[in-house]
Amino acid sequence: MIMELLHEQLFQLALIAALLVGLCAPAVGTFIVQRRLALLGDGVGHVALTGVALGFLTGSAPVLTAVIVAVAGAVAIELVRARGRTSGDVALALLFYGGIAGGVMLMGIAPGGSTAKLNSYLFGAIASVTTQDIWIIAALAAAVIAVVAIFGRELFVLCQDEEMARASGLPVRFLSLLIAVTAALTVVIAMRVVGLLLVSALMVIPVATSQQLTRGFRTTMLLAMLFGVIASVGGLVASTYSTKVPPGAAIVLLALAGFVLALAVGRFVRRARTQESTVSERPKLRVEEVA
Amino acid sequence: MSETAFAMTDGRVSFDGKAVLRGIDLTVSPGEVVALLGANGSGKSTLVRALLGLTALTGGRTLVYGTPPGRFRDWWRIGYVPQRLQVGGGVPATVREVVASGRIARQRRLRRTSPADRAAVSDALEAVRLADRANDPVQSLSGGQQQRVLIARALAGAPDTYVMDEPTAGVDAETQQLLADTLAGLVLDGKTVVLVAHELGPLEPIITRGVVIREGRIAHDGRPPRPEGDCARPGHEHQHPHATETIPGPLTGWQGEPQ
């Protein structure tokens, strides 16, 4: 059935969407993982569902309302992270539940709305991507790549060591919000491709895969972007062979298969590396001092 | 560059109602090499963090080159060496990438990395003898080597003042000596250094001023206190600050020979 749906132009649109998502999600994901916020994408994804439902309720494009609500959610998460220390993860969890419940509730209220309509946002519906969607996705993708290109150097310092960033005079609060908002934009881009429930997978898995094989931050990011594109395009193509293969799930499972492979290869490479460099010292235990 | 690097007046910090710094007056002039000494929990690390504005004062005030930390703009003048390297969420970073991040306060957004940046990074790597590890992930380095990466990161920025939080803690003798040599070079260049130390070790000859912190107050400020007796034994665990030990004595056992 998907094959029949995929007239040539539809497939092209889907391909462009998959390509953009595969490129953007791991680029942002590298910073997010480095900042120990791997679940940020999940959180924003849940919140974005409320945005989608809001679109149905108000009769505007769900992608646009999702952007607005996801950005607001990301800012809220960042503020919670920066303020609270111990209750941070609980606050995040509350936001997750609120996002899903809000989405389902608004969808129920929406005229002619049924939660079945949310399915394509929860699990992705790349085959139904429209030209308008593609323009929005392309614009968001350009914004995401621009942020990484312009602020990459500063974001690296921030995500590596926030105190260092502050002691270097970087605008820490601005950069923190920037990375959160960029993550939110990425979530919305990826929403149509892999679905809100699997968005975070494309931000995290390619990075986890890449870091098995690399030594540096920049190479990790570039390789993760390559893996992201391979997974998203590969998953999309795989789904055209059988109507029973949902593209979103295929993309994520392909990315996971890549991770398992990289895990094995990485272990092999590292073993070879440690054997060749006998001079390298073992890390010593350092006694922590609280003063 | 005749301004005062740091000036804290009646600096107070408390965490959850517990006073950690209880009225610190400290001025660091250019060219000084100040060691902040004290037992665990005396507040010396909090003091350096407060000097940099990383920990907000709950009372009093502090100035960095004449400006409160929140409004200070010339952060390239400060080279901060934190207690340990943060390796983040597991994304690898090469030694060169981390050292190059020390240039960030001198770099403009949208401006590409310049040849001067690259030269400064290479020089810094040479100075801490890690040039051959430049492309290795920092995560694969030992504690002492990671400490050297942090020092190289500060060196790369060529600041006027270095602020080091326990640069010698848990570090091998070779790295301690390397740090001492590097600092001696910086002192010759007229740089200012503020460092937190548990024991001075090979740094002792270059320290011009020792400030002993005890229970959040300055207990001694002047010549660096000399270790003696049991305290001079290498590896001695300091359970008390050398508050009153101002009598200079022979440094028997201080440099590390067994007793």
Image: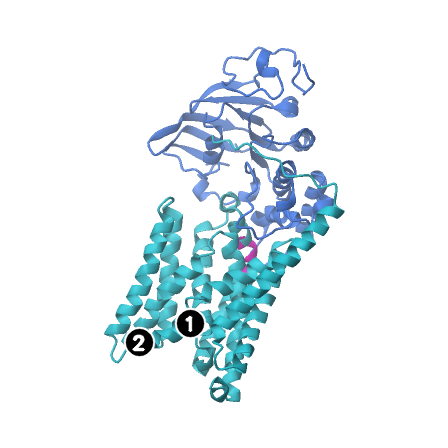
Q: How is the image coloured?
A: by chain
Q: Is residue B212 on the magenta stretch?
A: no
Mark number for residue A123? 1
Query: Where in the figure is residue A160, as x and y percent of width and height?
Result: 54, 49
Chain of the residue displaying label 2: A
Residue identified by numbered label 2: A56
Q: Earlier in the sequence, mark 1 or mark 2?
A: 2
Residue A144: in sight, yes or no? yes
Q: Is residue A262 above or below residue B139?
A: below
Q: Nearer the viewer, residue B68 or B207?
A: B207
Query: Looking at the picture, which amino acid does disc 1 mark?
Result: Phe
* Rendered shade, chain A: cyan
Which of A233 and A81 lies nearest the eye of the viewer?
A233
B240 left or right of A44 in image: right
At 58% from the left edge and 23% from the top edge, which residue is drawn?
A: B199
Residue located at (76% from left, 47% from top): A276
